[in-house]
Image: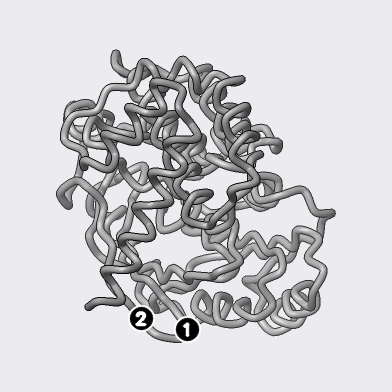
Amino acid sequence: MFFSVIVPIYNVEKYLSRSIDSVLSQTFADFELILVDDGSPDNCPNICDEYAKKDHRIKVVHKENGGLVSARQAGVSIAKGEYIFNLDGDDAITPDALMTAYQIISDTKADMVSFSYRIYTDGKLGNEVHDLVQEGLYDKKRLEEQIFPNLLSNKNMQNLFYFLWAKAIKRELALKYQMNLPTSIIMGEDACCTTPCYLAANLVYMSKKPIYLYTVRGDSITTSFKISQISQIAQAVTYLRNLDVKKPADFEELLSRYSCFLCFAILAAAAEGGYFGEIKGIKQAILGSLHKEEIKKARFENITLKSKITIFLLKKEQIRLAFYFLYICKKIKDIKGLIK
């Protein structure tokens, strides 16, 4: 068996059939589909079981809710395919996704293939989104020169795609770094798995083909704000720092920028969402954690004036001012949009 497609499932009843059908309609047939019901409270468990009755390639795992990491671990632990392909339960893939991955792997022997994706909103396909680097095969030398400097956060506050989805990863590689991940990490969990995979791989192929259809949802984990995200990212930074894999010489710099960038992003989400009552808690969470020192160490170069001002304020521990600055930036942007 060549591919194990793993789908973690929680509260995605509205999207699940589309996701499953996109796998079953693949032009490449040598795969197994592992549906992991992570204690979903809706009708997802029944949908999984009904599909399994109709197609022998489908395996269903029902488990108590434990979060995304534990769901993926439940899937990869029973996977038999040579390569793992992660697909979120509210997303889909194009009919030629696995065939494309298979052809690239057959031609290059890559340990890992990373693809582009397209935005899918309200039933409509949107823009293609591509990674930072050029398409092609990266051996160890090219990985060290062009991939590693763009992991987590580069000097321009950009990064390679963190996410596990839209990637085909050799099972031995995926198994090692997925199973080692603490289930308590619930933000930054993808970066905690993809980063060591990149560092340990001998050959990686970066593809510009958008074989993954990413669904934009207003209620998804990535679009909501919680103060706890700040401590969760701190946990991810600690985990990445202690990875049992050979790291590049500038890895500590990458971590500092990653910490700073995500604190910036979380603060921006809070400000743009008008969470004024959370300012004090945000300040305590940032200054009472490792982020305080990581932000001070972080150095960026070609970034926007908005980013420069925000990071300057963060370095000066002026969290409240940074919050209001980002709030005003959002309001100005809204006004400009109305004028247009």
Tag 2: residue type?
Leu
Is residue 22 in view?
Answer: yes
Quarter of the figure that contains the C terminus: bottom left
The dot on residue 125 is 2
**Which residue is pictured at 55% across the width and 81% down the height?**
18
- Residue 194 is situated, as x and y percent measured from the top left of the image, at 44, 39
Q: Position of residue 328 (x, y in %)?
A: 38, 52
Mark 1 is surrounded, within 10 Å at the Cα level, by few (under 14), some (14 to 19) or many (20 or more) other residues, namely few
Dot 1: element: loop
* 309 left or right, relative to 69: left
Residue located at (30% from left, 76% from top)? 338
From mark 2 to mark 1, how far is it between C-alphas? Answer: 9 Å
Q: Secondary structure at mark 2?
A: strand
Q: Is residue 211 above or below residue 190?
A: below
Residue type at the position of mark 1: Asp
10 lies left or right of 143: right
Q: Mark 1 highlights which residue?
A: 122
Q: Position of 82 compared to 142: left or right?
A: right
Count neighbours of disc 2 (C-alpha within 10 A) and say few if under 14, some if 14 to 19, many if 20 or more: few
- Position of residue 276 measured from the top left corner of the image (x, y, whole percent): 59, 48
* Residue 173 appears in the picture as rendered: no
Between 83 and 277, the one lying in front of the other is: 277
Front position in the image: 185 or 306: 306
Q: Between tags 2 and 1, which lies in front?
A: 1
Residue 79 - label: none
- Give the percent coordinates (x, y) of residue 193: 50, 37
Q: Residue at coordinates 26% horizontally, 47% vertically from top-left?
A: 205
